[in-house]
Image (cartoon, helix red, strand yellow):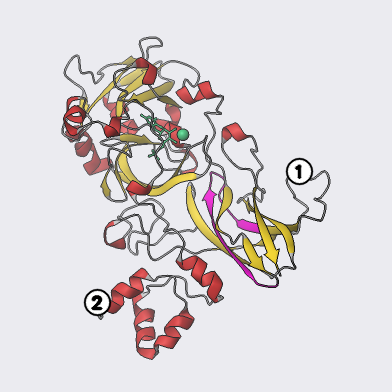
Amino acid sequence: MNSKLATFLLQHGNLTRRYFLRMGGASLALLGSSRLLADDREREPQIQRALDALETWLTRPDDFRDVSRGNPTPHSLPIEKRKEVGLTRDTWKLEVVSDPDNPAKIRSPFTTEKNSAFDFQGLMQLAKKHAVRFPKVMTCLNIGCPLGNGIWEGVPLREVIWATQPTRDLRRVFYHGYHNDDPEQMFRSSLPVGRILEDPYDLPPVILCYKLNGQWLTPERGGPVRVVMPEGYGFKSIKWLSHVYLSNIAHANDTYADQNNDVDSPLKTFCATLSLPAKVKTGQPIPVTGYAQVGISGLSKVQVWVHNDQDELPAGDRYFASAPWQDAEILPAPNIWGGDVPSNRIPIPTIGFDSETGRPKTWPLRCSLVHWAAELPGLPAGQFTFRCRTIDEKGIAQPMPRPFRKSGHASIEESPITVEK
Ligand SMILES: Nc1nc2c(c(=O)[nH]1)N[C@H]1C(S)=C(S)[C@@H](COP(=O)(O)O)O[C@H]1N2
Ligand SMILES: [Mo]
């Protein structure tokens, strides 16, 4: 294939078949064989323009929004200091010990004191046999909107826990990262040991993560090693990991609990807009794009509704269940993954993806993102409110089944639209 043309096609995975028809038969034949487009639906030009401007499915590691505590933040330390405190791959050390306050019985802890801390070489040794990859959206429970979507690679945390030979009184595991050796700056998270030892409901394992989108985890993303908890909000995925405690404590002891957060909450399903014109002309169709976070209960629909502000809202219907919602289009898996993933290929194997084709086995993927689009019909002049909501795989509409803010954002997004003559 003409390589210039191939590059062009790769960069414009969202162009319509109509566009290619205009390009003539030769390139169309080429398209058919190269399968550059998973999605060759014909759409209105204005919707197509909005789709062409959409963010990619994967986020570049440097483009993640950063939620990092610490003064200074560990990733901003100069390289010499990072080496000194074990924040590079060749200096990284992980302690895995019994919790002195609620001891679990373990035979061979990893400690710096006894010069037996677990290191990166040990991790790579385990990776040869046990490495896994899975897609996951990182979302801060307090912020609500996703910080970024990635393919995370690591070794299941249980491999390291089993290496310490626990025998009894192990009910919970808590862990923290480097925090300038200042107890005030510690940010701790915790999990029931059962979630680490076993993966319920076909979820991926909790991992010691060292790669994101096929590249070494950067200092800002928590490198050299962070925990990644597939179905959890961001605070479970501790960065610059340095300590793991095996404990007999019977309850969660996460730092985030001190901020009134529901620390046992798995990711919720919800949607939001990415592009929506704030002002349009009367009668002009309105293109809207957005994303949905596909939470633990999956996603079956994204729906939209435009309400004229002069009309009353349905009475006694807090979540607008009786409004005339219309289905939006959930976009298919893209052909351009983004996120700087090498050669635009999802690394193989990745949980949820076919190892032969590199394409997702189902779509959308749970605990990740999907994009959507809708074209609203033209409206008369006036002031309107646009709303969008998800319906999960159980048929439950946002913000249910868990509407409370401190278990994660799920409220129905509202955006104003002004329609002018
Ligand atoms: N050590 C450490 N890990 C941490 C944090 C932190 O402040 N310190 N923030 C947590 C929170 S609250 C979130 S939402 C995610 C954010 O991940 P990101 O910065 O890679 O987007 O990291 C988590 N891991
Ligand atoms: Mo967070």
| Among the 4 quarters of the image, the one containing residue 112 | top left
Q: Which residues are magenta?
A: 283-304
Residue 271 lies in magenta, yes or no?
no
Q: Identify the mark at residue 3; answer none if there is no mark.
A: 2
Q: Residues within 10 Å of mark 1 (few under 14, many from 20)?
A: few
Q: Residue at x 27, y 57 (%)?
A: 342
Q: Residue furthest bottom?
A: 25
At label 1, which amino acid type do we have? Arg
Say if 206 sits above or below 313 in the image: above
Residue 164 pos. (x, y %): 27, 22
Label 2 vs label 1: CA separation? 55 Å
The residue sitting at 74% across, 62% down in the picture is 382
- The residue that appears at 82% across and 52% down in the rendered structure is 312
- Tell whether 2 sits left or right of 307: left
Label 1 SS: loop
Name the one closer to the observer, 93 or 130: 93
Report whether 70 appears left or right of 316. Answer: left
Q: Which of 129/139 is in front?
A: 139
Choose top left, top right, bottom left or bottom right for residue 36: bottom left
Name the spot of residue 363 as percent of width and height, x first. 49, 58
> In the image, is residue 390 above or below residue 400?
below
| Quadrant of the frame with the C terminus | bottom right
N-term mark: 2 or 1: 2
| Label ID, residue 318 | 1
For mark 2, give the secondary structure. Answer: helix
